[in-house]
Image: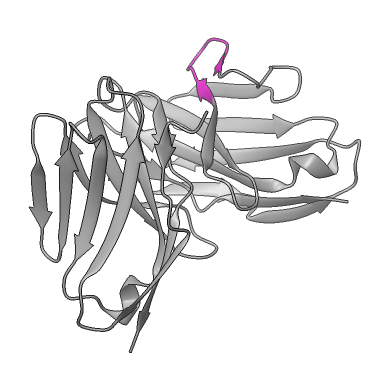
Amino acid sequence: DQQVKQNSPSLSVQEGRISILNCDYTNSMFDYFLWYKKYPAEGPTFLISISSIKDKNEDGRFTVFLNKSAKHLSLHIVPSQPGDSAVYFCAASLGGYQKVTFGTGTKLQVIP
Amino acid sequence: SAVISQKPSRDICQRGTSLTIQCQVDSQVTMMFWYRQQPGQSLTLIATANQGSEATYESGFVIDKFPISRPNLTFSTLTVSNMSPEDSSIYLCSVVVGGYTEAFFGQGTRLTVV
C-alpha cells in the first residue's frame, strides 16, 4: 500500500520556466510533509517542508502548497535552473520526524 | 546540520555472504534510521537504530536478516546477512539532529549481489 504517491516519474522543463511536482497521499493522519532532492550517487538532501496547519511555505525559488482536503501537495520551482535537475522525493510523517513515508520520486530535467 | 559518513559507498558481493555498512555522524544525534531503496522504488524504512538497545524493525524486516548495532550516539552499523540478488539496493543511513525537524542522509551504499 503506497501511502505517498508521485504519479509522474519524470518531468522536463525549460530553463527559466516553472517546475511543478505533484504528490498525493492517502493517510489523513500525516501532519508533516517534506520534499527531498537527490542527485545520482548522493543521499537525499532536504529541500523544504510544510506542517499540516499551513497551506503554503516558501523558501526562495521553492514553494510547497498543501491541500489537505484533496490530500495533495505540490512543489513549485520558479525559475527552474539546470542545477535543479535531480530526483525529487515527496515524504510525509506522523507526529513530526518519526517514521517518514516516501514517494517513488519524480525525475526533473531542466533543459538549458 | 550533520555530516554523515557512510562506508562502503558501493560493493559487489557474492550471494550467501554478509556485508556490514557503517554510518558515522560528526555530532551526537537523537535518532538514527536505516533505509533501503530498491531499483525504481521509493525509500523504505528498515529500522530505527536505538542507542544501547535492540533496533526497532518495520514490518517485513527482521533482525536475523538485518542486524543493527548502535553502540553510541554517533555510530551505527547495518549488516545485510545471507545475501541474495533481491538484496541489491541502495542502503541509506539517516539521522535526526536536535533542533531540526528534517532528517539528514548519508550518501548511501550501493550493494550489488551476484
Task: Give the farthest residue toward the top.
Answer: B53
Q: Is residue A97 above or below residue A86?
A: above
Span shown in magenta = B47-57
Could you tell whether A112 is left or right of B39 in the image? left
Which colouring convention does the figure follow?
one colour
Q: Is residue A66 above or below residue A14?
A: above
Q: Position of residue A48 (x, y in %)?
A: 22, 49
In the image, residue B101 lies in the stretch drawn in magenta = no
Say which of A105 and B87 sits in front.
A105
Could you tell whether A44 is left or right of B62 in the image? left
Q: Residue at x 48, y 23 (%)?
A: B72
Q: Position of residue B79 (x, y in %)?
A: 71, 31
Q: Is residue B67 above or below residue B11?
A: above
Q: Position of residue B22 (x, y in %)?
A: 61, 39
Q: Position of residue A97 (x, y in %)?
A: 30, 28
| Quadrant position of the N terminus of chain B in the picture | top left
Say which of B68 and B102 sits in front.
B102
In the image, residue B49 lies in the stretch drawn in magenta = yes
Task: Give the farthest residue toward the bottom.
Answer: A112
Q: Quadrant of residue A95?
A: top left
Q: How many marks?
A: 0
Say which of B56 and B52 sits in front.
B56
Say which of B58 and A79 sits in front.
A79
